[in-house]
Amino acid sequence: MRRGYNPYLLPPWLRKTRFYCKGIIIPITVFQLIRLLIVPTTGDFLLLCVLVGLTFILYKDII
């Protein structure tokens, strides 16, 4: 059985990258949502879905 997730087992450069990504993913997602509301296209919708999924994954500490 796998042990629980421990972010301190990651290399320092990866921990730092995750930290900065957590700080910047919400503003990028909000900007993409506003852009989707102004000019809706299929590409914008797919990008927003990816960003929302990435936001969920980062804040639930799955990666």
Image (tube, rainbow, N blue to C red):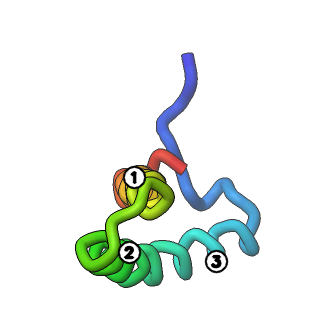
Considering the numbered disc 1 on the image, is that residue within a helix, a strand or a loop? helix
Could one spot residue 26 in this view of the protein? no
Label annotation for residue 32: 2
Q: Which is nearer the eye, 43 or 18? A: 43
In which quadrant is the N terminus drawn?
top right
Q: Residues within 10 Å of mark 1 (few under 14, many from 20)?
A: some
Residue 54 placement (x, y as % from top left)? 46, 56
Residue found at the very far left of the displayed protein: 37
Q: How many marks?
A: 3
Which badge, 3 or 2, comes first in the chain's sequence? 3
Considering the numbered disc 2 on the image, is that residue within a helix, a strand or a loop? helix
Q: Which residue is mark 3?
A: 16
Query: Alpha carbon of mark 3 to alpha carbon of mark 1: how far?
Result: 25 Å
Residue 43 placement (x, y as % from top left)? 50, 58
Which badge, 2 or 1, comes first in the chain's sequence? 2
Query: Alpha carbon of mark 2 to alpha carbon of mark 1: how far?
Result: 10 Å
Residue 26 placement (x, y as % from top left)? 35, 76
Q: Residue at x 65, y 74 (%)?
A: 17
